[in-house]
Amino acid sequence: MTRTASVTRSFSFDAAHQLPWHPGKCARLHGHTYRLEVTATGPVGTNGIVIDFADLKSAVERDLIDRLDHTLLNDSIDNPTAERVALHILDTLVQRGLPVTRIRLWETPDCCVEVHP
């Protein structure tokens, strides 16, 4: 019997954005220390893993963290709400062939969004 498992790796990056349409403080340029959780799901292979944590780390850092860290998100993502940033991350990783089943993006210690393919 083939069994599946989910593995999650956490990351963080700092970035700024502004939401000009927002009626509150978010209309002004401001920054966050984002916490990102990437979950991959798939069959547990003969080697006993879904994906090597190191491989997941290198892919996320190369394809996302290195490109988003210390940037103005408005320059690369239209209307960069937490939801749209999370969807951008999901789309990027799925296009790279990673078996991503969940992205959870924490914009503050108390507020996060979760997206699925």
Image (spheres, rainbow, N blue to C red):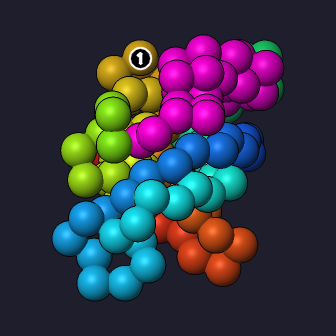
Q: Residue furthest bottom?
A: 23
Identify which residue is drawn at 46% across, 46% down: 101
Q: Is residue 13 above or below residue 18?
A: above
Q: Residue furthest front?
A: 28
In the visual, does 21 lie left or right of 35?
A: left
Q: Nearer the viewer, residue 52 or 20?
A: 20
* Region of the chain picked out in magenta, as a range: 49-73
Q: Mark 1 points at which residue?
A: 96
**Label 1 CA crowd tier, 10 Å (few <14, some 14–19, many 20+):** few
In the visual, does 26 lie left or right of 71?
A: left
Q: Where is residue 107 in the image (x, y as percent from the top left)?
A: 57, 64
Magenta span: chief secondary structure: helix
Identify which residue is drawn at 61% across, 35% down: 70
Identify which residue is drawn at 40% across, 66% down: 28
Element at badge 1? loop
Query: Residue 54, can we see it?
Result: yes
Residue 58 in the magenta stretch? The answer is yes
In the visual, does 2 lie left or right of 11?
A: left
Q: Position of residue 63 (x, y in %)?
A: 52, 19
- The picture quadrant where one finds residue 60 is top right
Q: In this view, does 26 lie above or below 51?
A: below
Q: Which of 117 and 71 is in front in this view?
A: 71
Residue 104 in the magenta stretch? The answer is no
Q: Which of 29 and 54 is in front in this view?
A: 29
Which kind of residue does numbered mark 1 sit on?
A: Arg
Query: Residue 8, can we see it?
Result: no
Q: Position of residue 10 (x, y in %)?
A: 73, 45
Q: Nearer the viewer, residue 93 or 85?
A: 85
Identify which residue is drawn at 52% across, 60% down: 30
